[in-house]
Amino acid sequence: MVMNKTDEEWKKELDPQQYKILRKKATEPAFTGKLLHNKEKGVYTCAGCGTELFSSDSKYDSGSGWPSFWTTLAKDKIVEIPDRTVGMDRIEIICKNCGGHLGHLFDDGPQPTGMRYCVNSLSLGFKKKDAK
Ligand code: FE
């Protein structure tokens, strides 16, 4: 992890919902995220530190209720961690730069990768691509 902020610092900096998700690994209720149906062209960033994580080009509607992507902008920006907390074998995904919880990675995504990066909308920011 590159950033080393204390829990207190994160608490001050993030809004309470984002703090719970990014720092305490909570999950937002399905179908509530602001970015779930966002179809604009642009880049999705980590809401904790601003690192660019996903492109709108790999976003798709998974039907899960959370923003879903079939690939990342760069694999080395995301860390995959085995997660057995709900009695299921899952892979948690976190931002490598700030350690913020993003969501989970599943292998039921579309081709060409077959992967589904299932991400909390509240873990993300969005930078719209300038229309030219
Ligand atoms: Fe981050």
Image: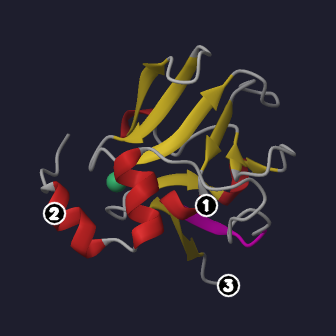
Tag 2 secondary structure: helix
State which tag comes first along the sequence, 3 or 2. 2
Q: CA distance from mark 1 to mark 2?
A: 23 Å
Q: Is residue 57 above or below residue 129?
A: above
Q: CA distance from mark 3 to mark 2?
A: 39 Å
Tag 3 secondary structure: loop
> Residue 38 has which mark?
none
Which residues make up the magenta segment?
Answer: 39-44
State the count of labels: 3
- What type is the residue that disc 3 sits on? Ala
Asked if residue 52 lies left or right of residue 1, the reply is right
Looking at the figure, which quarter contains the N terminus? Answer: top left
- How crowded pointer 3 is (Cα within 10 Å; few <14, some 14-19, many 20+) is rated as few
User: What residue appears at the point 60 percent right and 83 percent down from the top-left corner?
Assistant: 130
State which tag comes first along the sequence, 1 or 2. 2
Which residue corresponds to mark 2?
A: 8
- How crowded pointer 2 is (Cα within 10 Å; few <14, some 14-19, many 20+) is rated as few
Residue 97 at x, y = what percent?
A: 27, 47
Looking at the figure, which quarter contains the C terminus? Answer: bottom right
Tell me, yes or no, if residue 54 can be seen here. Answer: yes
In the rendered structure, are the residues bearing label 1 and label 2 in contact, judged by CB atoms less than 8 Å apart?
no
> Residue 131 has which mark?
3
Which residue corresponds to mark 1?
A: 121
Residue 121 at x, y = what percent?
A: 61, 60
